[in-house]
Image (spheres, rainbow, N blue to C red):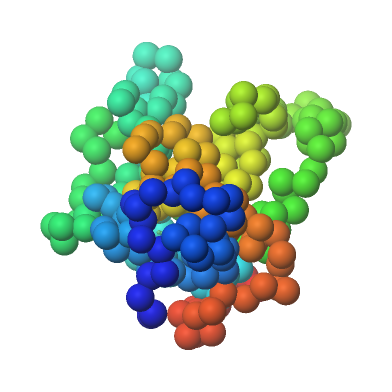
Amino acid sequence: MPAPVYSYPAPVNPAAGAVDGHAIDGAQLFSQKFTSATGLGPSFNADACIVCHPGGRGASADEAHFARRVAHLDPASGRVLAMAGGDSMVAPRRTTAGDAPLPPPREANVVSLRMPLALAAATRIDDIDDAIIEAQAVAKDDGIHGRVHRVVGSDGRSRVGRYGWKADVPTLDAMVAAAFSDEMGLSSALAPRPRPPFVDDGRMARAVASFLRAGTAATPPQAAAAGAGQERGQ
Ligand code: HEC
């Protein structure tokens, strides 16, 4: 891997579209290996998007890449609750200090292993109108129907959630920001539960989302090498 181009958490507020004079390149960020000097951690699951989504579009069936979603099931109500104080439902396994693998938080009595998904369709889900999704949430003969989950995004607008656990993330930009923050410990102002100080003021997440939207037309620089032998679901 080449040395990181960006000096995060250096100021992320120079002229729009550029950081330290470099254009923000979503493809490059997708394959960039982050370190604690560039905003990784202190706890995280992997140091680059491309580790878990090989080739820039792929899923990974390697268990080392599975995310652990955790929650607390309240025995009285039977409801699954986000854990008190937690700003994320992903329990990271590793630390930048190189400690032993982190166990799930003690109060978690629900642990769900999630496989990294292929991202080819993820961008298109963002484009579907709320009304079309809502129109599908009706019983189809058998009385069973889905329920949309309306979420208020960082822009204050309510939208049907599309990503994450229980569709708790409303837009692709927010999902990418959630991935930076939940999987890599790299805080982003666009994440669903933003926690300052931010390494990303939102432009990194937007740049990576536009790279994903560009589809197969865009290929991350190290895709071939990093994804070799692990391509899935393409
Ligand atoms: C440690 C592995 C890991 C890393 C690193 C990772 N992801 Fe993921 N990603 C996942 C898992 C697991 C899911 C599925 C989440 C679920 O089902 O709860 C996912 C889901 C997604 C989705 C939603 C797909 C859908 O259809 O709902 C997007 C978009 C995404 N990741 C983008 C990224 C980006 C961009 C990065 C880098 C900033 C990244 N991921 C880093 C494991 C990872």
Where residue 195 appears, as percent x and y from the top left, is 38, 34
- Could you say which is closer to the camera, residue 76 or residue 168? 168
Image quadrant of residue 71? top left
Task: Judge whether 17 appears above or below 189 on screen.
Answer: below
Where residue 80 appears, as percent x and y from the top left, is 43, 26
Taking the view exactly as shown, the residue that stands out farthest to the top is 76
- Could you say which is closer to the camera, residue 79 or residue 37? 37
With 52 as the anchor, is 18 left or right in this view? right
Image quadrant of residue 91? top left
Where residue 188 appears, as percent x and y from the top left, is 45, 43
With 194 as the anchor, is 190 left or right in this view? right
- Could you say which is closer to the camera, residue 79 or residue 85? 85
Where residue 148 appears, as percent x and y from the top left, is 69, 29
Which of the image's four quarters has the N terminus? Answer: bottom left
For the point 57% across and 38% down, the residue is 169
For the point 77% across and 46% down, the residue is 127
Which of the image's four quarters has the C terminus? Answer: bottom right
For the point 21% across and 35% down, the residue is 106
Residue 95 seen anywhere in this rendered image of the structure? yes
Residue 178 seen anywhere in this rendered image of the structure? no
